[in-house]
Each structure stands twice: as structure tokens, then as C-alpha cells.
Image: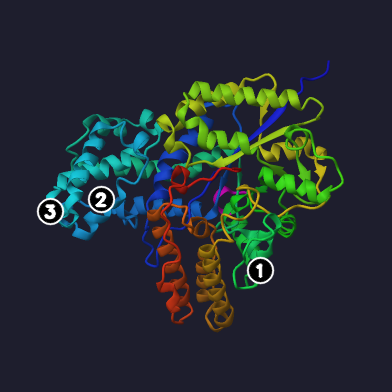
Amino acid sequence: MTPARSLHVVFCWHMHQPDYRDAQGTYRFPWTYLHACKDYVDMVAHLEENPLARAVFNFVPVLVEQLDDYAEQFRTRQFRDPLLWALATPDLKTLALADRHSILDQCFRLDPEHMLNPFPAYRRLFDLWQFIRQDAAEMGDYLSVQYLADLLVWYHLAWTGETLRRKSATIQKLMAKGSGFSAADRLALLDCLGATVAGLLPRYQALAQAGRIELSSTPYQHPIAPLLLDFRAAQDGLPDAPLPESPQYPGGKERVQWQLRQALASHRQHFSAPPRGIWPAEGGVSAEFVELLGDEGLQWTASGEGVLGRSLHHSFPDRSPAQGRAAYLYGAYRSTPQGPHLFFRDDSLSDRIGFDYKTWSGHDAATDFVQRLEAIWRDTEDQPAPVVSVILDGENAWEYYPYNGYYFLSELYRLLSNHPHIQLCTFADYVRDHGDTAKALPKLAAGSWVYGNFSTWIGDPAKNRAWDLLCHAKEAVDRKIGSFSVERQEAIRQQLARCEGSDWFWWFGDYNPGDAVRDFDGLYRDHLRQLYDLLEQPAPAELDQAISHGGGSAEAGGTMRRGHT
């Protein structure tokens, strides 16, 4: 009897937050910890509750290290996260006016439809704030200590995920109380959240050791590696893209190798084994970068659908265009016979989860998704082992879903785990079982999952200026680093890595919201100043000037992009 033909489906959920710590180690924005309590907890819980589900979870090393740091903050009660520090302050009367302003600035920065309006007590705090802020200069005098206590508690309750709310008696008790939270209530909340964060990475590691999930990694501080290697990679997808004034990033290959090797060491330290695959920052690939991955023994990497289309055109310019995406998208590739396997995400399916299904009922959205997979299964009947890659953030999408996506994800995993023709797997599973079906892709195009190019990170005047500032700093590093101790040299390399992260360049541009651009712009320039401080060299005056001001209204607050327009 011929075995039933299966369509393999890989969900790769990308877990990432930039390093928000300033020179004093204070967390400027609390998002790392909040996503940990909401999205990372929910994502692992769905896999724990469904033994047949499989997925890849990609943890960026800088995120893992920040989670370690948060666990230590909870253990010692020495909080560097300003909102947790305020939550833990025994007597809120002691808060300075600047601290009150900071609490009010941060504690309403979330999606109101799904994270504020569902909670009447939290909404009342917001309505009062809307009235008080008409006279912002005096707001600290109008708002009571009890208001601040309730606001801090509700903000953290709103950022707990659905699975934690369903399982934690502490969270349920506080949400039922609604207002008038005492210092004891705040301490109970801290204890609950601290235990949740401390237990998070062990839960993922346990599933990985049981073979139910795969844990992959990304170069250490999430840099766009192809651009560090060669700015001209930007012109592969956009030939007329303006480039920075600096001809190249100095010593880019050495820096990419350092970022990659740091990631492999960090992953081995935290999860007791090296990763078998790399989801490069933003799916950014180039032939030179993939060669470096192969040199480190990685089995697979992945990018976006647009990169595959251009790669096929470069590799086979005389071949007739494929009739439909099913003819080329749902398979593995290799650019060299011994190189890593290459997977390319289905932009349409990934974007439906990231952007479209948030307004659907969970059941309807999951059913629609499965039906689209069934159509792909029918369209790939002539292929020996078709595979669909669905790759997107494991955090940012869910705050725009009702109940943090709980009903959608539960139903989706249930339907797929029991489907007769669809098999959930990981990239490593697929390479092990079907790696020999990979097709040759001699000329890999340079690009990312966003539009298939690098326009999100380079080519805009503000983005190019940010690159030039970084290049100038790197030149200073190269001149001075040899004159310092081994310990100081390592601190310089670590600080340089923070400045090389992709998120700074993501946010520069007038199409992004002004508040977010202001925050990232300021922190990026602060990181560069800290780098000059480590070099014992005055920071250039140009770092005092804002790079970008923003002012747009990008979809999903600018935290996500669609893979295609």
C-alpha cells in the first residue's frame, strides 16, 4: 500500500527584543519582560497542551540574556526595569514627580481595543488620565498614590497572557478585585510574575529535549548580516537604492563571524546544545552570509518568498516563469551541494496570521488557514515532500487578537495535529527526513523577508545617516581598541554589537510613529555615545542631533511589516 502523501508545515515563531538597557543597565522600555509574560508564555503553553503539535521557536541571544537578567531582578528585588521598580516600591508616596510622569507615559502604551477596553477598571483609569492630562504640568498633584498603584497593577495584568490568566489564582484574584490594590497585592503580583519568568526558558528547553519543538537562533544582537558584509547587497533588490556615504562597514566579515559565534555559544550555554539552524535577522540573506553559516556547520536557514523569486530568476534566467507559486515555493533549496538547506516563507499565509486574522473569530481563522493548506496539498501532488514555511513574530501580532490569540492558536494546532494529509514538523525534522529532495539554487539573491529587499534598513536618508554614524564609530574602535585591556576590549565589542542591531535602522523613517522613532533614535545615539566613552574618546557633536522624527501611522504601530505590498 502506498503511504498517504503529506504536506509538511513548519511554523517558525521568532522571539526577539532589542537590548533596551542604557549605560547604567536600566531598561528604558519594559517590552522585553512584558512580552515574556504574555506571548512567550502563551506560545509554549499551546505546545505543552497539544502533544502532537510541532514548531520552531527562534530565540535571539540578546533576548535570552535579558530574560536571564529579568529573572535575576525578580530574585534579588533589585529592579532595573522602571515599572517593576515602581510596582515593588513599598510606599508610592516616595516616588519623585519624574517617576510619576514616566509611569503615566508608559502605562497606556498598548493596544486599547484588546488590552485596555476589555477591563473596565483599567479603562476608568485611562478616562481619568485623559481628563487630567489637559493640565499636564499639574498632573502629579491631582493623581493619588492609589491611582498609581492601581495603574501599575492593571498595566502588568493587561500584559499577562491568556494561559497565565486561566491558570494563576493570584492573577484571577487581582483581576476580580479590580481596584484599591494594596502593597501586599503588588508583592503577590511580583511573586507570580517572577516565578513565570524564571520558569519560562526551562519550559522551552524541556519541549526541545522531548523532540516536540526545535530551538533555533539568530546572530547575537540581531544585525542585518548581509549589509554588514557589503552595503551593495541593498542594490541587489533595488539597483537604484542610495547607499551611505561610507563605502562599506569596516571589518564587516569579522563582525558577522563574531556575532554568529557569540550566538552559537550563547545558545549552547542556555539550551545545552548548539542550534541546528539560523533564522537570520529579518530573514536577511546573501550568498556570502550563507557561506559563513555553512562554515559554522549550520544545517538550515530561511528567508522570504521575494528572495526566492529573484534567486530563481538569477539562477535560471532562460527558464520559463513557473505557472503558480506551488511550482517553486514549497520545497527546500541549497545554493551549494554541502551548504545549509534554504527554506522560504509563504508570505501570504504568514501575513494572514500577522495582520488579517486578528479581526476574525478564532475558529473561522483557523479553518480558513487549514483550507488554504489543503489547497496547497492538492496543488503539490507531483512533489515528493512539499513543505510550507510559516515564519513571523512570536509576539507582536497577538496583542491585536482577542484573548491574545488563544482561540485561534488552540484551534489551529488542534486541526493540524489531527489532519490526515498535513504533518507539522520542524526544519531540522525536514532536513533529516527529506533533505535529499532539496533543489539546486546556484545564485542566491540578497534580500530579506520584507519585500524581498533591504529597503526597511537602508536607502532612506535617515537610515543611511545612521549607518554612517555607526561606520564612524567602528573606525574609532579599529583605531583605539588595541590600546586597552582584554576586559575593556570585550566590553567595546559587546557595545559595538548593540549598535549593530537591526531594530535601530528599522525605526528610522517618517512612515513610523513619532513616539517610537523618538525612543529608538535617542537610545541608538546613547549607545553610540557609550561606545565612544569606552574608547575614552569624545563623542562627535553630530550625535546630539536627532536622526529621524517619524510621524507616520504604520500598520500595527510599526512593529511589524507585511512580506509584500
Label 3: few (<14), some or many (≥20) within 10 Å?
Answer: few
Q: Which residue is mark 3?
A: 141
Q: Residue 104: where, in percent of width, then height?
A: 25, 50
Q: Residue 46: where, in percent of width, then height?
A: 50, 30
Q: Which residue, as the protein is rendered here, is positioned at the far right? A: 318
Most foreground residue, 29 or 443: 443
Local secondary structure at mark 1: helix
Q: In the visual, does 414 lie left or right of 195?
A: right
Q: Is residue 292 above or below residue 308?
A: below
> For the residue marked with disc 3, what is the amino acid?
Asp
Give the residues drawn in magenta, as a range: 269-273
Q: Earlier in the sequence, mark 1 or mark 2?
A: 2
**Picture quarter containing residue 533?**
bottom left
Q: Which residue, as the protein is rendered here, is positioned at the far top? A: 1
The Cα atoms of the two marked residues, 2 and 3, are separated by 13 Å
Q: Which residue is mark 1?
A: 254
Label 2: few (<14), some or many (≥20) within 10 Å?
Answer: some
For image coordinates 57% across by 37% down, the residue present is 351
The Cα atoms of the two marked residues, 1 and 2, are separated by 44 Å
Q: Earlier in the sequence, mark 2 or mark 3?
A: 2
Most foreground residue, 386 or 243: 243
Most foreground residue, 230 or 273: 230
Q: Residue 198: where, in percent of width, then height?
A: 42, 45
> For the residue marked with disc 2, what is the amino acid?
Leu
Residue 96 seen in the figure: no
